[in-house]
Image (cartoon, grey):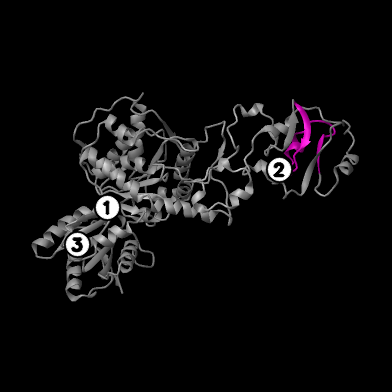
Amino acid sequence: MAKKFELNEVEVWDGNMAAAHALRQAQVDIVAAYPITPSTPIVQNYSKFLADGYVDGEFIMVESEHSAMSGCVAASAAGVRAATATSSQGFALMVEVLYQASGMRLPIVLTVVNRALAAPLNVNGDHSDMYLGRDAGWINLCSYNPQEAYDLTLMAFKIGEDPNVRLPVMVHQDGFICSHTAQNVRPLQDEEAAEFVGEYKPVNTMLDVANPVTHGVQTEEDWHFEHKARQHHDLMNSFDTIKKVFNEFKERTGREYDLVYTYKMDDADVAIFALGTTVESARIAADQMREKGIKAGVVSLRVLRPFPFKEVAKALENVKAVAAMDRSAPGGTFGALFNEVSATMLAHGKSPVMLNYIYGLGGRDTTIDMLKEVYEDLDKCAKAGKAVVPLQQFLGLRGPKLSFY
Amino acid sequence: MAKDMKEIKKVEEINELGWNELIPGAALFSFTEPVEDVVEVPMEERPYAPTNSHEWQVGDWRVEKPVYNRDLCIDCQFCWVFCPDISILSRDKKMIGVIYEHCKGCGICVEVCPTNPKSLLMFPEHMDNNEALSMWPKKEEKK
């Protein structure tokens, strides 16, 4: 029996410690992990909790992130709760197995501390890894601060393990700005967290020797399509479960989560659409723009996958200009958020001016002033009723201004 | 709700399933019902599911086959232990022969056979087993 960890009502935790405590409280049976900056402290803290008797489980030291996720896949198929953490290059090495986990419908939880992808080598935060795993068939939850990293990691288990979902879940937090910045976090006490997450319910477990089961079968043109259809159907229908778990969490803690996050959007003319810690900076920028008479708001995704198509359209229905902020090198096109938000608006018969900002790559600081410049651009476009600035701009870049279209 | 694959008794029934009737994750069960203490239940009495590879001809890429010679065999069970595809049939520690539906022709059974001459030898796939037995080599003399 695991020891109870004495927690204060308010703890001072960085995002890594917050995620580690969530894994501890969820009493994960198997953590197979390989360390990588900036997510290392999540699994390091977890292994210390385990060594000190605060978890009944096993920690498997593996030789790579590919093996870390493979260990989680095996453990989950065998019938236990499994989780791990990674970032950047480690995430990239895991990608093959991410598709195995979702295709095999194993509710593994992966806490991702977002970091840039080399080259050039860089340990700081951007969303390159998050974007790399976008199509891997996982549920993707996005946090903006340590409290949310804690809350969403606890909720991830309950969402992924729901019998109607049975899909793996990633919880994203920004490298360093969230993962290494200590803030006030209000945790649940151990018993309450355990009660919320619930006992793990194995499905088609490999350890039922009287009823042997094969996981990870081969199907060719005869069956692969149907299995992928079933997987997509269940991912698209996980919204109901996600909302249900968000509600249960609100009843317990008073903290409210929704598929789409909005700030001052009721009367907004212009909106910044961003992910991660930038959401909190954009809120301050929006407040300052409002003092100048510009009706500014902020929209973000709490759930990147499945993409909340209707809720995004609803949040932006009356907006005149939107800046989709992509913190990942766009690789020869517009940023992914720009493409998805533009398509969402077009499909709903709305046509706000859509701008795309590439920002914050490799941990480049994104200041309130820079975000206010974005709002100034949006305001000009909103007043003109058309794009009067380039559609894609690089924000906070040294050298001549870089823009396209 | 996904159709329970364990209820399916014939492969043809699976071919009629739609995407919404599949078990999430493509899990396939070996048996149509649980089998307690499976090692004590002979192969022919196990309730194999139609999706189990036991029910399928999976030896068809073999180009050479192992042929078994009962007259030389000492029932040491090495071939049974080493066969990577459970394609050696043995009952009560007595060798019976090779299951050609599943044997891939890897030759490990021949490699580990300790008799002189060997009781298992590889022959071309198309050769009749009786013809192969008539060509069996003589005992190798000690040098």
Q: Between label 2 and label 3, give the one nearer the viewer.
A: 2
Which is closer to the viewer, label 3 or label 1? 1
Residue B141 position in % (x across, y down): 89, 32
**Residue A197 percent coordinates (x, y):** 33, 36
| Label disc, if present, on residue B102 of the rendered structure | 2
Give the distance between the C-alpha atoms of the residues marked 2 and 3, in whole angstroms.
Answer: 67 Å
Is residue B121 covered in magenta? Answer: yes
Along the line of sight, which residue is nearer the eye, A310 or A207? A310
**Would residue A54 appear left or right of B108 to someone viewing this image?**
left
Mark 1 residue type = Gly
Which label sits on residue A276?
A: 1
Chain letter behind tag 2 = B
Q: Label 1 marks which chain's residue?
A: A
Question: Residue A163's image quarter?
Answer: top left
* Residue drawn where x is 40% and y is 46% of the image: A165
Question: Residue at the spot x=34%, y=49% of the render?
Answer: A240
Q: What is the spatial separation of the Cα atoms under label 3 and label 1, in whole angstroms?
A: 16 Å
Q: Disc 3 on helix, strand or loop?
A: helix
**Residue at mark 3:** A370
Alpha-carbon neighbours of circle 1 within 10 Å: few (<14), some, or many (≥20)? many
Point out the stretch of residues depicted in magenta. Answer: B93-122
Q: Position of residue A107 (x, y in %)?
A: 42, 42
Viewed as shown, does residue B78 lie left or right of A239?
Answer: right
Give the residue at x 35% y 62%.
A336
